[in-house]
Image: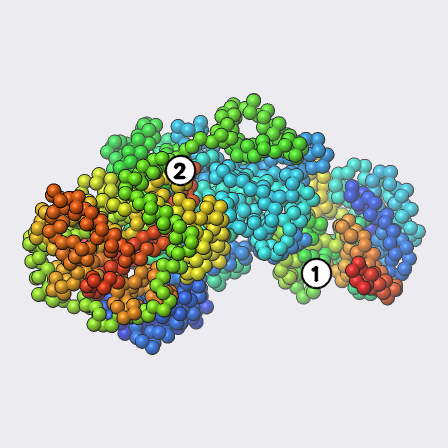
Amino acid sequence: MSTLVAIIAATDPAERNRSIESVCQGASPETLLAECAALEAFRRESPSLYERVRALFFLSCIHRYHLPTALVGRGAALIPHAGYELLLNRRFEEAIEAFLQHQADHGPSDALSSALAVSYRELGLQTLANQVRRSVRSLRGNQWMFRVGHPADHSLRIRPELLASRGTAAEQGKTFPVLRESTPVRMDLSHAGWSDIFFLGMDHPEGARVLNVSIDLGVHGRDAAPKPPVEAYLRVIDTPVLRLTSVDLGASAEISDLGEVFDFARDHLGLLKAAVIAAGIVPPGIEGSGASLADLLARVVGPGLGLELVSSVNNIPKGSRLAVSTNLLAALIAVCMRATGQARSLTGPLEEAERRLVAARAILGEWLGGSGGGWQDSGGIWPAAKLIRGVVATEGDPEFGASRGRLLPRHDPVPLGASLQDSLVLVHGGMAQNVGPILEMVTEKYLLRSAAEWNARVEAGEVLDEIISAVEAGDVPRISAATTRNFFGPIQTIIPWATNIYTETLIDRVRERFGSRFWGFWMLGGMSGGGMGFIVAPEVKAEAQAALAEIMADTKRKLQHALPFAMEPVVYDFAVNTHGTWCDLLDGSQAIMPAGYYVLTIPQLLKTDRRELSPSRRAELDSFGEACRTKPELSGMIHSLFDRLFPREVGGRTNLGELRATLAELGFDEVQHEQIRSDLHSGRIGLAQNRLPASSVIEDVQNQDVTGFDRGAVPDETMRRLGMEAIGRGEAAVVTLAAGIGSRWTQGAGVVKALHPFCRIAGRHRSFLDVHLAKTQRIARLAGGDVPHIVTTSHLTHRQIAEAGLPVILSPGRAVGLRMIPMARDLRFAWEELSHQVLDEQKQKVRDSIHAALINWAETSGEGNDYTDNISQQCLHPVGHWYEIPNMLRNGVLARLLTERPQLRWLLLHNIDTVGADLDPALLGCHISGGSALSFEVIPRRIEDRGGGLARVNGRVRLVEGLAMPREEDEFRLRYYNTLSTWIDIDQLLKVFGLSRADMLASVGPRAGEIAARIDAGIRAVAAKMPTYVTLKDVKKRWGQGQEDIFPVAQFEKLWGDMTALPEVSCRFLVVPRQRGQQLKDIAQLDGWLRDGSAAAVEALGDWT
Amino acid sequence: MKIKRAVITAAGRDQQELPLQRLVDRDGVAKSALEIIVEEAVAAGAHEIAVVVRPGDEALFGAAAGKSPTRLELIPQPEPLGYGHAVCCAHRFVGDEPFLHFVGDHLYVSDSSLRCAQQLVAVAEAEECAVSAVQPTRENMLPYFGAIGGRRVAHSRNLYDIDTVLEKPTPTQAEQELIVPGLRAGHYLCFFGMHVLTPTVFELLENGGDAGRRQLSSALGKLAGRERYLAFETQGNRYNLGVPYGLLTAQFALALAGKDRADVLSQLVELLARQPGSS
């Protein structure tokens, strides 16, 4: 029997919890492949879901980490495109079969293992997610909702109390009563190492424990006192529609079509729609039935009547780590359930069984809306402090036999012996981060039982015990010590990315300011930087609140270009809520909605003739008018309404005058811009036109077309010496491309990627630029020479990098573009023609709905128009890395370099995120001896390397961009992927532009004008031969309290790799190891990068100060 | 146990006219709904029958009850205090004995040679306990009925030990609390409108504590905790006259189960053939 299968099947916990590393470390490829075959057979046969899932994660781990190491030196290989297509379509089982068949036919390879690793991992996560969904659906109380397929099947009825003004009362001008659910949010004192992830609770219920507290909240300095921040309002209306309003998101809609209820991304009302569905008012089973919403409402509410649902979260910013959105969803579901008799009590608190059902429905709602939280997140509906624990599934539970734990945990109250309010300063640091990848990383690590993480998990459990005991004892310093130990110990051992330089700076500064009166730090939720807690001695709490506001604002100011911030930091006031969720029935003159609702709706109503308003609407407005006169909290309504009716121009939109001025300053080419717009409109350029002609013959290169440095062989000593001597003589320089703002890294939020401290290396958080400089310093030291380090910048990054004061030479960008609203044709091409990873069912539905909304946005905003509805930083764009070297000619940087260092001959050009690239002497020696103008570094392809590669195009060896591939499958015929790292012979390159070294030296003298004109002419001539690609870029538009919308905008680019297509440029292609060539584009890559030894390899390349 | 008396409640605000509606029974004779119910009771062995009505309706209901061979008593419910209270009004009439109870707005059509009430009384007398007639009902009808949760009695096909009784539950409540193993998904055992009850129910109703309206279902829920209380899946169907087209459906059911079946069917077919648009 295989060792790994024996571990999975073991009954003895000591054996079962053995890590995979203990078996696979250093194993031969044959042993690993034999283990894989055994695991593959086992996972297909095992009846236990968790055995299957663990086997899948083991398989993924072997293919991701162990086989690639064991297979070093076996060369590049191909991945079958058919398997890739299956993978994109989430047909994981078939994809695995295709890859395994290819492995059987052609032997194992690094490339194939990368494909299998992804397939096994995705299948594992899908299996787990399906189990959660099955459990949610099969939970008693939820099942019926999936059976209702017609209004006549519906058996919910509105509570009679809510119809009090039905009939005569409505005609007489009375309003219907309003049901108001007020719900606290939850903060967790410890989640025992993310043990609240559903999968983990269901795999290891004993380890799933969270201590969380329900709290009321207010923004310090803004709100008079903390109150339940989440409110949901429901009432009957005399129109047969669903009227949904989100006060905080400023969105309102009257829905009369059943299909629209299931269209989550159409507007900002997705959460309210999910609540209406999860509460059973519009049951999920009726989706797609073609039934009439009016008929359904007639059945549930009454003929001619409808429902209005309003949400309000009292301006609490997004990303607070207090589960605001889950608790809002729970509040909305609770109020809908009460209104339809699904809770015994119409008002007051909920009973325990009802709370559990609301929690289960919130899980369902999150799934419907395509999001997902932890199982503790709806904790706000329970009162005060409670220990939430996983429960072992027993016979009779729907989970029994499939998973070890139940879907829903149990909640046990914990006495709060300590007055946390007196010591805890609760804040939102302002950072916006996506916790999603972290949850997947944790799941994978736990299921693999990786030793360090598993031990940390055990320690996190002990910390939780310590916190519970300290909470019961009322010992706040002990709580503080435990939460601090948790953050710096187990949490960071499990996920190093849970911390960041911003959080640690805040902690240091608070400690410095308050000394021993600062008791400890507390990370809320999945990662730090957003919601956080600082615990101080009670006597300095007020001072600490003021100090933290100041420290956070100041630290944010210093780091705002390096880290993604969504908003200004805020300090909260809070109070423990002892009721949990609570409902009131507002009747008569009290039956009004929150003030923000009227600010939103009255301007619209004012446009309506009063006689056309329904009697209840007229009566409501009278009540509201009366309330404005008598209630002090509504005294500012007139101003708010006036502002809404006549909005002022505020931030979030570019001042067009300023934008034009910026464009002029940055050398914007208006003529070229208009030409591009005209070409876009006419269809001469576009996403489809980026492609090479369909008749192009795209083939893989032959072995003699590349020079291999990837086989783990010792580089030729002669080459190394040649390179080292050149560096020692000062002949080489490094050029780092740093014009970008890390769109993918921050999901469009935008930071100066060069300055982004992405990882802790040699004991400190280091930015990408820190890493590159450390490598340059090391080589310079070893060679005994001086190596200039040039950083190319753009208008988005120049000032910030200059202010960082690093020992670099800046080469400012001299080309900028203005983004445009994309053509609907291009959006359709991108979303419908190109292959994409299909998401799981519900998420895919949401994505399709977003796409439809965005196509509508492009059409109504004017396709091809300038994109100016955002801050200017998001409206302008760099025009592609091809321009970076020409920029160095134009801006005088190269001329100055050559003047100061006449011996300079070689440049290494690389991207900011190619963290393994350095001035490697052996590669430089190889470039020198090869005699080509450019030597491009390529790496053996893995499945994640999408976007072109090294090919023979109609017989010529060149790099092809993914955008230019005539057929998507062509890319899968190419074994090598472009890293963009390029070794440049300066003199030969100048020749390509029709220039010489002498010209460059003369460009800073009296002939400057003449030479500048020649430089411009040379650049224009080469640019004319370079293809112009139209690309779509996601930009974020921020608004409200940390809210963001993402828009795809069109821009154009010229790319450096196309230099290889010019016949006059001699090129070589060097195959380098993956660790050197891989680019870090996505935060989700970090964990693997750390784990597969890449991070350690980079650390070994630098001199770290 | 011997059932001698029956109580029919007909004082509900929305149902007061329903028992007075005239229908043609299985034998082709035009009768009021109340008369048909009285016949059902008599056939089941009840010699004395009480009808609880709204004050002032006694004469109307007395006439509608027909010429029954049994003693008929009309008991006014002084105030509209709910279904449970209406049952309580018959306490003196019933005394300290078990009794058969019908709601006044349901009619029954048996699938066997025994009438529905006969089947029920036979079970109650054999088991010597309170028994409610039930019928598996689709969940979309839950807003109209009381429903029970429980377990099938060992070695029985149609008897259930009742654990829980809920009046007009939501499907959410029903799914969580009215579990009956062996029933089709989305179906619940809903009351048939016909019960054999023990005098304990009066005690539970009278001491129910509800100041306002008293509900029979909550008392029946408590009854399950006090003594043996069974549900009996009757061979037959009940027709609720109070739902939309309820009277029409009941009439069809009676006619199609009676001697005029062929005539009614042929009239129906003719009616269908004359639908607008058909040639």
Check if mark 1's residue and mark 2's residue have beta carbons within 8 Å. Answer: no
Q: Is residue A324 left or right of residue B279?
A: left
Residue located at (36% from left, 61% from top): A691
Residue located at (11% from left, 55% from top): A905
> In the rendered image, which quarter is residue A405 located in?
bottom left
Mark 1 residue element: strand
Residue A110, x across and y down, in percent: 28, 68
* Residue A352 or residue A275, whichever sits in front: A275
* Residue B208 or residue A313, whichever sits in front: A313
Residue A29, x across and y down, in percent: 26, 72
Residue matched to label 1: B159
Residue matched to label 2: A653
Please give the label number shown on residue B124: none
* Residue B190 or residue A1020, whichever sits in front: A1020
Q: Does A646 sit above or below residue A485?
A: above
- Please state the total of marks drawn on the protein image: 2
Residue type indicated by callout 1: Leu
* Residue A227 or residue A1023, whichever sits in front: A1023
Question: In the displayed image of the protein, which residue is found farthest to the front?
Answer: A1010
Residue A165, x across and y down, in percent: 68, 35
Distance from disc 1 to disc 2, alpha carbons, whole Å, reads: 72 Å
Residue type indicated by callout 2: Arg
Q: Pointer 2: residues within 10 angstroms few (<14), some, or many (20+)?
A: some
Q: Is residue B38 left or right of residue A535?
A: right
Residue A47, x across and y down, in percent: 46, 68
Residue located at (24% from left, 72% from top): A702
Chain containing the residue with disc 2: A
- Quadrant holding the N terminus of chain A: bottom left
- The image's colour scheme reads rainbow
Q: Does A86 sit above or below residue A993?
A: below
